[in-house]
Image: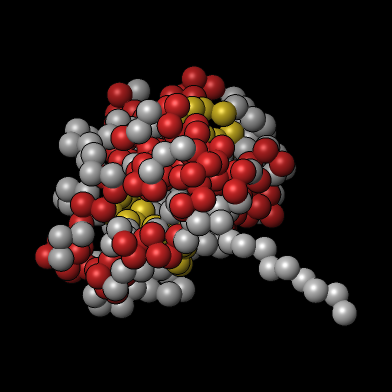
Amino acid sequence: MTQRTAQKTATIQDVARAAKVSTATVSRALSNPDLVSERTRTAVLEAIRATGYRVNQAARNLRMQRAGAVLILVPNLGKPFYSGILAGISDGFAGTDYAVLITDTESNPLQEGALAGYFLDGRIDGAISLDGGLPRAALRQCEAQDVAGRIVFLCEWVEGEAFPVIAADNAEGARLAIRHLHALGHRRIAHVTGPEGNVLTAARREGMLHERSRLGLPAREDWIIRGDFSLESGHEAARRILAMAERPTAVFCSADMVAFGLIAGLQAGGLRVPQDISVVGFDDIEMSRSYVPALTTIRQDRHRLGRRAAEVLLARLKGRPAPEPQPLIPVDLVLRASTAPPP
């Protein structure tokens, strides 16, 4: 009969002995590393590796009255736009002891009091919302429970609220798109918007209108077509353009997905892109490079946006709120094959 010897689980006392420091110093090095010297931190980390010590994260969170998790609110996880942003958020929390939880607010809308409840039930320490459609009542409940300071908005926001917002320069992106089409020689430029009431729709439309006015371009209301950031709204915009007696020679779309639907609809109707009509998108999602024709678009640095939101939330969780407004993340025009001079 073979006798197995159970391996002893390393304790914090074992780490303290190996590092030649007190258990209090080990605890401090783990929970508040800034309070100990670099030499002490190094000694403690080496002792942890040597002893195989594992932190009991659940117990530690309980002692510190924290959940060790943050919640990401995404309005539609099926949209490819969010992949780069979520990767940036994950990157921002890498190396921390926070777990990242994600919920889809479109398929699983927040019930009344749910957001404040996540905090009060001890399930999360903070939240990043990519959903600018959160009910104001939910935000009021968070303020009433004194947890609103641990919420950061990303890409979208709720107009008139004082939460920190990490966003791209949407208006400038629209101006870049119109300026590019104008430089190619286009004067009849249409715009397919996002959904009514959305802050991104408003910002991109404002930038488009500003640049159109500055350049003295025709202000045709029928060339501003309502969409909703979807392929389907691009198809519908193509149907409307094909039916026009006087068609635009170029279209600026509020999102790449709209542009894909638009191009497919226009080509099905007998128009060539860009020979007969040019198309510009917004976002620069991965498919933009491989679509036929490859899409000229406005690039948002989605990874940078996500990482920045994580950094701002981490600072707030550590008690270092940034009172100054966050600067807008710059955007770039990416030139590809879907734009050319007008016929």
Seen as rendered, the residue at the extreme right is: 1
Give the image location of residue 172, x and y in percent: 36, 30
Which residue is depicted at the point 65% across and 52% down? Answer: 264
Q: Is residue 172 above or below residue 142?
A: above
Seen as rendered, the residue at the extreme top is: 183
Q: Observer-nearest residue: 77 or 201?
A: 77
The number of numbered discs placed on residues in the rendered structure image is 0
State which quarter of the image contains the N terminus.
bottom right
State which quarter of the image contains the C terminus.
top right
Q: Observer-nearest residue: 14 or 323?
A: 14
| In the displayed structure image, the side of residue 35 where residue 189 appears, left or right | right
| In the displayed structure image, the side of residue 284 where residue 273 appears, left or right | right
Which residue is depicted at the point 62% across and 43% down? Answer: 50
Q: Is residue 33 above or below residue 256?
A: above
Colouring scheme applied when the structure was drawn: secondary structure
Give the image location of residue 297, x and y in percent: 54, 35
Residue 341 in which image quadrant? top right
Which residue is depicted at the point 45% across and 27% down? Answer: 39
| Residue 212 in view (yes/no) | no
Which residue is depicted at the point 43% across and 32% down? Answer: 40
Give the image location of residue 91, x and y in percent: 52, 43
| Residue 111 in view (yes/no) | yes
Q: Observer-nearest residue: 236 or 112?
A: 112
Seen as rendered, the residue at the extreme left is: 144
